[in-house]
Image (tube, coloured by chain):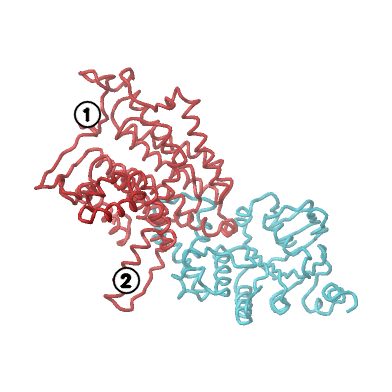
Amino acid sequence: MFGLDKKDFNLFLVVAAMALLAPFILNPFPTDSALAQFNAGYPDLMQRFVIFGIFAIGFNILFGLTGYLSFGHAAFLGVGSYSAVWVFKLLGMNVLPAIALSVVVAGLFALLIGFVSLRRSGIYFSILTLAFAQMSFNLAYSVLTPITNGETGLQLTLNDPRILGSSATADGSIPVTNLLPGLEIRSAYDLVIGPWSFTFNVGYYLCALFLLLAFYLSVRIFRSPFGMMLRAVKSNQQRMHYTGLNTRPYTLAAFVISGMYAGLAGGLMASMDPLAGAERMQWTASGEVVLMTILGGAGTLIGPVLGAGFIKYFENIFSKINDNVLHGWFAFMPDGLEDFIVTIIHPFIGKGWHLTLGILFMLVVIFLPGGLVEGGQRIAKMFRKKSEGTDTHVDAKHPAE
Amino acid sequence: MGILEVKDVNKRFGGLQALGNVNLSVEENTCHAIIGPNGAGKSTLLNCLIGKLIPDTGSVMFDGQSVLGRTPYQICQMGISRVFQTPEIFGDLSVLENMMIPIFAKRDGAFELNALSNVFGQRDILEQAEKMLEEMNMADKRHMHAASMSRGDKRRLEIGMCLSQQPRLLLLDEPTAGMARADTNNTIDLLKQIKDERDITIAIIEHDMHVVFSLSDRITVLAQGTPLVEDTPDKIKGHPKVREAYLGETA
């Protein structure tokens, strides 16, 4: 269906259901319960899940298929954000032209950087992309201040022309981003069922639709002759050359496509909250998408989305647990023991969430080299073995699953 | 004039004269073997033919066109396919996909952004690949991971991949190196069959004399970068110069 085979279509349906029902799935605990802090179903965080999911899906088209590890993908995200904010400043507050421009600009920027960086492979390619990204970051931070507003970051002001909109609203404030005239990105509807509360936000659903589009395209690319050639690049470039194929345009196309995905993510980020700062281009941001892809499973279809969700959940939920919360949980214990346990756990929560994430990342890479997807596959296999006995058939037609 | 004409080719690596005035002519639809002791320059010569190395002087003409200055993929598109000493296949892909890639390359050229159609929806390519696998007796292995096959099967797949592009010249670089006896014999049989059934020119570099004498129509003996003799296998066998090059002067 839609050019996908049955297995891929089912996977797509699962992703679609997860994305569209996220406000329910991520808010399993009643609002006033002690576990409510594990709820992730608020618009801001859901948007981040989805935007970084798009970013990681795009990164995976380059890294997962061709094996070229780019350490500078955040540069494209940053460029996308800046382009979008400029559209809001000059043109108007509708997000669609902003998103379109951010994809185009990021694509052109990726063409330039890819053209140079792809002359080398392996570690040299990684270093070249890292150098370009850091160059972009530093330029945005200092020299290019007229375009990027340097340290402060690019923001909307009351003096922006906005030729298709208005510089200021009737009550004198800066206008907000909208999808259609009158349909603001930030507008939301709260559904209250008993003790539960679910928020449906326009911005989130816009991001979710783009995620589904991005995911669908990535499935098509994975299953296409182009995708097969990219896997062949990863497998054996020598044989490709002696088969009459030029690897350079293949890798460059993959690089530009993944740069455009990053630009889309950046444009969406700016559409949700119209500002852009240089820190979005920093190497830590580039490293994050590498972690997401590897954690979820590089070269798999769904892995990058899982990895992005996993990391963003940790960043936003674990970092909020503090000692007071812990004392609350362990209040049933004798005082001495309670303090002892809280002291032990303390480094892993709050500001120490990076430590927990780092340990989990190491465990996944060591025990599940295929990422979270491999974990899922192993569990599924265990169940299948129990129910079917000896069936160990592996479908080699889809090694990239 | 032969399909492949090598004229006065010289190649120097620093102080080492790897190739000195090599002249070679390979006739169409024959099997031409290049033999010689270690360090004779066989691999260097081969690398000059396929664009991996550029000779210092001399010319290499394939079917009336110079191959010098062309990249490996352009030379491949002229109709020269190469089989490597260690089989070079796409280890991470399935056998069927391995076979489809050269057919795609033959149809679509060096680059084609075909990103939205399904690989297995390309009927014509799939059929050709399946047919080639049948010919190679590998149809039952089509869904196997290519890297997990035996050396002999990898070689068979690699030769099949080359043949699927219908090359006019097939270059084989020690195709049986490091193979078990049974695999070697299978490979010889396969190559004989290819030679008999197809309009194809084969140039082969080989150490194993058994392979050389069972396949070739003509043999060039290379020693220290220069062709020593060129003749039919029967004459080469008893040639004193060849014995000298292989066994040393006292023999």
Q: Residue at x 36, y 54 (%)?
A: A219
- Which residue is at 36% across, 29% downward? A85
Q: Nearer the viewer, residue B174 or B198?
A: B174
Q: Are marks 1 and 2 in contact (CB under 8 Å)?
A: no
Whether labels 1 and 2 belong to a single chain: the reply is: yes
Q: Name the subunit of mark 2.
A: A
Judging by colour alone, the chain drawn in cyan in this rendered image is B
Residue B166 % position (x, y): 57, 64
Pinpoint the chain carrying mark 1: A
Q: CA distance from mark 1 to mark 2?
A: 52 Å
Q: Is residue A91 shown to the viewer in this render?
A: yes
Q: Nearer the viewer, residue A224 or A362?
A: A362
Q: Which residue is mark 2?
A: A382
From the rendered image, report the letter of the chain displayed in red.
A
Check the picture and name the quadrant holding the N terminus of chain B: bottom right
Q: Is residue B163 left or right of residue A152?
A: right
Nearer to me, A70 or B222: A70
- Is residue A229 positioned above or below B156 on the image? above
Amino acid type of the residue that numbered disc 2 sits on in the rendered structure: Met
